[in-house]
Amino acid sequence: MIELCLKFELCYPSNKPENYDVWYESKFEECDKEACLSFSKDMLCSRVTVDHNYYAICQNLLSRYATWRGSRGGLLHDPPAHIAKDGQLEAMLEECANPKKRYGRFAAAKELREYLTQLSGTAR
């Protein structure tokens, strides 16, 4: 994060864009096509912190909204029963793809990374 901020400071040394330090949240768009993703380059490039990569991964690869080459449901569809039973994985995926809370995607992506890391450690 520090490196990113330093690069940003070099790009905007004295005339920083308005709201440059306010976190940017990509808007969820449900879509019935393959790998849907829309964004504003101006918005993404004028903020220090954006959630767009998290949005792209959660919506188009991992969550139930993902559609790719005729398959639906994302890479994490149909988890084993012992993982699915508490609903934690599904809740994190939903918040990451389509957040209900302000900055929810940032928190959900972090929790999801930690959860999947923990699961991969117990699978060995």
Image (cartoon, rainbow, N blue to C red):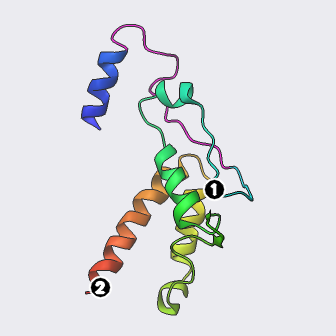
Going from N to C along the chain, the mark reached first, 2 or 1, is 1
Other residues around mark 1 within 10 Å, as few (<14) / some (14–19) / many (≥20): many
- Which residue: 51% across, 84% down? 79
Quarter of the image for residue 94 reads: bottom right
* Quarter of the N terminus within the rendering: top left
Residue 54 is labelled as none
Q: Which residue is drawn at 45% across and 58% down?
A: 109
Comparing 66 with 116, the one in front is 66
| Residue 32 drawn at (x, y percent) | 74, 59
Please identify the quarter of the rendering in which residue 124 is found.
bottom left
Q: Is residue 106 left or right of residue 70?
A: left
**Percent coordinates x, y for residue 106 in the rendering:** 47, 50
Say which amino acid is labelled 1.
Answer: Asn
The image shows residue 113 at horizontal and vertical percentages of: 38, 64
- Kindly report the distance in space between the C-alpha atoms of the residues bearing marks 2 and 1: 28 Å
Tag 1, which secondary structure? Answer: loop
Disc number for residue 98: 1
Task: Kindly identify the residue that appears in the image at 48 percent across and 51 percent down.
Answer: 54
Q: Main secondary structure of the magenta part?
A: loop
124 above or below 46? below
Residue drawn at point x = 37 percent, y = 14 percent = 12
- Vertical position of residue 5 compared to residue 51: above or below: above
Region rendered in magenta = 12-28
Residue 99: quadrant of the picture: bottom right
Q: Looking at the picture, which amino acid does disc 2 mark?
A: Thr
Residue 15 inside the magenta-drawn segment: yes
Residue matched to label 2: 122
